Structures are given as structure tokens and as C-alpha cells.
Image (spheres, rainbow, N blue to C red):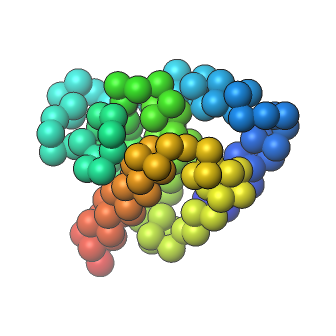
Amino acid sequence: MTIEEIQNEIIDEFSMFEDWEERYQYMIDLGKDLPLIDDQYKTDNNIIKGCQSKVWVHAEMKDDKIVFTADSDAIITKGIIAILIRVFSNQHPKDIINAETDFIDKIGLKEHLSPTRANGLVSMVKQLKMYAIAYQTQLN
């Protein structure tokens, strides 16, 4: 699936819920299914700066696509990174770099997060795109 197709799927899933309490619960459930980072990568180098909670992300290239794994010490944050990894993992670096992230606004996520969590969300997206830039540079 393309990044845009995955984003549209997420928008559809979030539209099924009546209120934000149900959406938060869904995000928590998504976090439980997150492809977890190996403990050896839970280092300070892999912590996303700008997040109130601890969020570790690891990226590696497999067949010219980036595979992300992650973990967080907070359940909502774990759900947020799970959504982002679902969108960006197993995609070509160039597609990640060029991807729009307006699906975040379409599901209303940023406006329903505390300011510190919203900043953390922006930091997560930036970090995933930075990994993509680094890997794209290696491919060139």
C-alpha cells in the first residue's frame, strides 16, 4: 500500500468512532500492536527529542525500504508512534520524505492532544523523515 492509501485507511478508521474517548482507546490498542524496538536500540541516541514521554525509534533498510520499530513509556504516545510507523514503515525513503501528513489534521489528532504531546507528534514526524533523508542519501 502507498503512504496515501494507508493514511486514508486511518482516516476511515478514526471516522468510525463517535468521540475522542473511543479514539484514544483505539490509539492505545494500536500501541499494543506496535512492532517493538529491540532492547539493544533503547538508547539515548534513539530517543526522539521534543517528546515529554520517552519514545525510542529504530530504522533500518530492507530491500530499499525503511522498516521502523519503536516503543514508548506512555500508552497514548505509544499509540501515536504506532500510527506513524504504520504509515511510514516499509516505504521507500523518497516516498517518506515527500509524504504529506495532513491525515493527522483530518483525524483531529493534534487538536486533541496536550500542547506537549502535539509538539512530540511533530518531533516524531520530523525524526522519521530525518531517517528517510539519511537513507535516501545512502541510496544516491
Residue 42 as seen in the image, left or right of residue 116? left
Residue found 48% across the figure and 64% down from its top: 96
Q: Nearer the viewer, residue 9 or 18?
A: 18
Outermost residue toward the front in this view: 115
Residue 45 image offset from top left, x and y in percent: 15, 45
Residue 22 image offset from top left, x and y in percent: 73, 27
Residue found 79% across the figure and 34% down from its top: 19
Question: Does the rendering let one see residue 63?
Answer: no
Residue 100 image offset from top left, x and y in percent: 58, 69
Does residue 34 lie above or below 57 as drawn? Answer: above
Q: Nearer the viewer, residue 140 or 20?
A: 20
Number of marks present in the image shown:
0
Q: Nearer the viewer, residue 114 or 42?
A: 114
Quadrant where the image shows the C terminus: bottom left
Q: Nearer the viewer, residue 27 or 4?
A: 27
Residue found 70% across the figure and 46% down from its top: 10
Residue 38 image offset from top left, x and y in percent: 28, 27
Residue 138 as seen in the image, left or right of residue 118? left
Residue 28 as seen in the image, left or right of residue 75? right
Outermost residue toward the left in this view: 44
Residue found 22% across the figure and 43% down from its top: 46
Question: Does the rendering let one see residue 75?
Answer: yes
